[in-house]
Image (tube, rainbow, N blue to C red):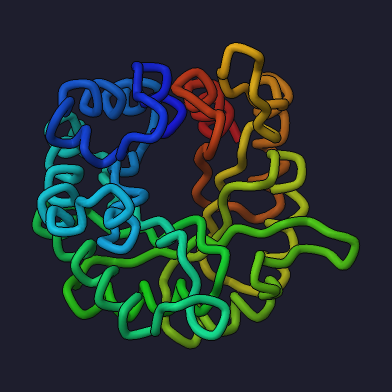
Amino acid sequence: MGTELIRHGFPQGACPESWNVEKSDIVKKIHKSYFDAGSDAVLTNSFGGSKIKLSSYGLENRCHELNHDAAKIANEVKPEGKYVAGSMGPTGKFLEPQGEFTEAEFEDAYAEQAKGLTEGKADFLLIETQYDLREALCALRGARQESELPIFITITFNKGPRGFFTLMGNSVTQCIEELEEENVPVIGTNCTLNSAEMVELIKIFRENTALPLIAQANAGKPSLSIDGKVAYSQELDDYVSFISPMIKSGANLIGGCCGTNPDYIKKMAGIIKKT
């Protein structure tokens, strides 16, 4: 969604969720392009839709409206038999003692976002790109206060000399164990890693859980060109060459994260149907 918004003229420093009201026709067009490319589910334009994240734009009081409209827009172009996932990304802040926020404040922020997405008729909620397991669990508790929709969670990991860990030092096994304890029905990982690295990570996930797994890799690392445009290091053909290995490693739901676009989804959908 972010990549496509920029391609459609989204200005640097603005609030992506504001386009759910101001330029809903563009957001709707993007959703349709993904459904047309073969997506079974699309994510709402609400990644930064918690009131904590929206407060940096002075839009915290419009949290419910912007999330409600995010789901409503996607539903307007949803084909029969397809799905709309309510995207709930990180707040961008940290919990005490590293940051200034309490768990109760995070839960409250996610609860309001979940309410908007649910009332806008999302089919399920995706708490995604979580770099702190504590925050992911706050988001889960908050969402469950206001929604009875299925809630899936994806964590983002960095690869280092010791293996895969979140920014806050959570291991893959710790995340799996605690999410299983909370009866999260579908878990997985997204962002940061390219599709080759994602194969390796999904293999570790599958060795440690029987739950359905989501895998959404980046199209490599981002870089900024001289004219201010963001480009990603992994070309389409290289990216999709790891989709079959991803499935064989245990992924059940596969999508694209930063740098991917409908062209990636179209090729991926073709490979998935044949695998």
Q: Is residue 159 above or below residue 134?
A: above
**Residue 27 image point, x, y percent:** 24, 28
Q: Give the quadrant of residue 152.
A: bottom left
Identify whether 7 is placed above or below 221: above
Query: In the picture, residue 10 is in which quadrant?
Result: top left
Name the quadrant of the N terminus: top left
Please provide percent x and percent y for residue 239.
Answer: 68, 29
Residue closest to the far top: 227
Q: Position of residue 230 (x, y in %)?
A: 58, 23
Q: Is residue 127 left or right of residue 267?
A: left
243 displayed left or right of 152: right
Indicate left or right for 161 with 158 as reference.
right
What residue is at 51 percent from the left and 63 percent from the top?
Answer: 130
Q: Quadrant of the C terminus?
A: top right
Residue name at image x 62 percent, y 22 percent: 231
Q: Is residue 189 above or below residue 99?
A: above
- The residue shown at (72%, 28%) is 241
Q: Name the residue at 63% across, 32% down.
A: 219
